[in-house]
Amino acid sequence: MRLEWYASFREMRVAMQKNLFAILGRFSQLRMAGLALVFTWLGLAPAAILAPVPAWARAIPLLGLAGLVASVALASRVTARARSGAILAPLACLGMSWMVVRAAWVGWRLGGIVWRGVRYPTALLAANQRVRV
C-alpha cells in the first residue's frame, strides 16, 4: 500500500501552516523564530566546513549535521524507505525553516489559523489548548 500526503511542496506548506503555528509554535512568534533558527542552523551546517574558524569550532555544527543525517537514515530504515535521502536532510531543514517563518507571518497577519475554510482566532485557540508548557 502506498499513501501520498502531498503532491507538491506548496501543497505541503499550505497544509502544515496551521500545525506549525498552532502546535509547534504554540502561537508564539518568539518560539517560531527559535524554531526557524534551529532549522536554519541544521540546514547550513554543511557550510561550516568552509568557515575560517578553528577545527574544533567547525565540529559543533558538523556534530548536529551528523545527528540529523543519522536520525533521518534510521527513520528511513524503520519505515523501509531509501536511506540515500538522508543526505538531503539539510536541504529539507532549510525548507522547513522557510515554512516556519511563513506560518508565523501568516498566523500573525490573520490573527489565527484557517482550517477547512474557517478562521480561528489565536486568543480562542490558545485559551483552549489542552497541553500547556
Image: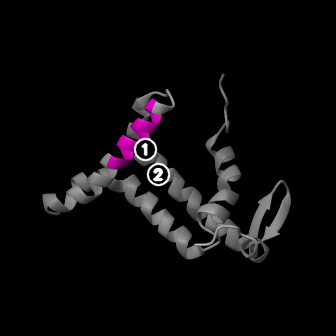
Q: Few, some or many C-alpha atoms within 10 Å of disc 2 (few <14, some 14-19, many ≥20)?
A: many
> Predominant secondary structure in magenta?
helix
**Quarter where residue 130 is shown:** bottom right
Q: Which amino acid does label 2 sit on?
A: Cys
Q: What residue type is labelled 1?
A: Ala
Q: Residue at x 67, y 30 (%)?
A: 3
Left or right of 130? Residue 53 is: left
- Whether 76 is among the magenta residues is yes
The segment highlighted magenta reads 67-77
CA gap, disc 2 and disc 1: 6 Å
As helix, strand or loop, the secondary structure at mark 1 comes to: helix
Q: Which residue is drawn at 26% across and 56% down?
A: 48
Pointer 1 residue: 89
| Quarter in which the N terminus is drawn | top right
**Quarter where residue 8 is shown:** top right
Pointer 2 residue: 93
Outermost right residue: 118
